[in-house]
Image (cartoon, rainbow, N blue to C red):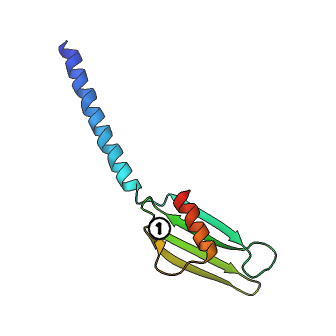
Amino acid sequence: MAEHDEELKKLNAAAVDLNNQTESLRTSNEKNFQRMGFVRYSQFGEAGNLSFSLAVLNNHLNGFVITVLHSRGESRVYSKEIQAGKSRVKLTDEETKALSEAANG
């Protein structure tokens, strides 16, 4: 009986340790980027949807939107910060769609 009691104490300690490790991973994982939304489109009416908006968020809906506008002569890259699912600056329709995909994904 004493052997079983000692084994149960070891198993209980191991279970507590695993629970602590799991909680630590869960907490740190909330800050990782886990949600993405991607919208491809043709900004300047040229063939091939080469422009795109990409939203990348964590579980708190913090992150960024990157937009690349591609034309024959040049490409432009824009980024906008997202806090709690909102941007301080106006988003384009495509950026809003990418953000919505990431937030609701």
Viewer-side residue, 72 vs 2: 72
Give the residue pinned by disc 1.
85
The residue shown at (52%, 61%) is 103
Image x and y of residue 12, in percent: 25, 29
What residue appears at the point 40 percent right and 60 percent down from the top-left corner? Answer: 31
Q: Position of residue 73 (x, y in %)?
A: 75, 87
Residue at screen point 37% across, 49% down: 25
Residue 5 occupies quadrant: top left
Image quarter of residue 71 = bottom right
Say whether residue 3 is left or right of residue 54.
Answer: left
The local crowd at label 1, few if under 14, some if 14 to 19, many if 20 or more residues have their Cα within 10 Å, is: some
Residue 13 in the image: above or below residue 6: below
**Quarter of the rendering occupied by the N terminus:** top left
Vertical comparison of 46 with 57: above or below: below
Report the quarter where the C terminus lies.
Answer: bottom right
Q: Which residue is painted at 57% across and 80% down in the image?
A: 78
Residue 92, image x, y percentages: 60, 78
**Extreme-bottom residue of the structure:** 73
Identify residue type, mark 1. Answer: Gly
